[in-house]
Image (spheres, rainbow, N blue to C red):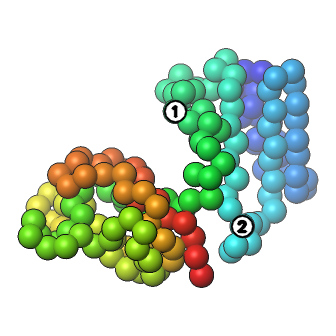
Amino acid sequence: MDFKKVQDLIKYFESSKLTTMAIEDGTFKIALSKLKETANSEPKTLVVNDPKILPPNVNVKAQNTVANKPTEDILLKDVTSPLVGTYYAASSPTSEPFVKIGQRVNKGQTVCIVEAMKIMNEIASPFSGVVEKINCKNGDVVGFNQVVISLRPQE
């Protein structure tokens, strides 16, 4: 199935009264839903492995990394950088880092700083949890939506 056909299917689905739709054509599968997710539900990711239907600027290998994550990593929630800049684990070179592996973090707590255009932007955790991974080192350049810290969610 080519990308144009997929776009047409999505447009048709959006304008129809259907609430869910699933299509399978050989190795190609797509599932669409208009049902709203609850606050506790995880967003669903569709992984497409057929490069014939993807637009030319989509990297199939990058998409497949989600599908190949170990099950234990899927349970982690990621804190991402909302902007491009330089990652800092602490407020100054001599200060203790905001968080360490194994530390409990509360929703809204500062977990790092991303410097962009000489402005220090404090990055707050969008949820509570325990720090499982710190994916950056002081001075690393981070991209938009890059995972900087992974947390094991806790209430």
Expressed as whole percent of the image width and height from the top left, the position of residue 96 reads: 19, 73
Residue 141 circle label: none
Q: Which residue bears the numbered disc 2?
A: 41
**Kind of element beneath mark 1:** helix
Residue with the mark numbered 1: 62
* Residue 150 visible in the picture: yes
Quarter of the rendering occupied by the N terminus: top right
Q: Residue at x 15, y 66 (%)?
A: 119
Residue 5 vertical placement versus 78 (above, below) = above
Residue 129: x %, y % from top left: 51, 73
Measure the C-alpha gap from mark 1 to mark 2.
24 Å
Instruction: Give the left or right position of residue 129, taking residue 28 as reference.
Output: left
From this viewpoint, is residue 80 visible? no
Q: How many marks?
A: 2
Residue plotted at (57% across, 70% down): 153
Q: Answer left or right for 146 relative to 85.
A: right
> Whole-percent x and y of residue 76?
56, 59
Q: Secondary structure at mark 2?
A: loop
Residue 94 placement: quadrant = bottom left
In which quadrant will I find the C terminus? bottom right
Q: In the image, what residue occupies the spot 72% across and 67% down?
A: 41
Residue drawn at (32%, 71%), measured in percent from left and top?
99
Residue type at the position of mark 1: Ala
Q: Which numbered disc, 1 or 2, marks the residue that appears first in the sequence?
A: 2
State whether residue 139 is above or below residue 61. Answer: below
Asked if the residue under mark 2 is in contact with the one under mark 1, i.e. CB atoms within 8 Å, the reply is no
Mark 1, other Cα within 10 Å: few <14 / some 14–19 / many ≥20? few
Please name whichever residue, 102 or 65, is drawn nearer the observer in this view of the structure: 102
Residue 133 versus residue 62 in the image, above or below: below
The disc labelled 2 sits on which kind of residue?
Ser
Which picture quadrant has residue 92? bottom left
* Residue 25: image location, x then y, percent: 87, 24
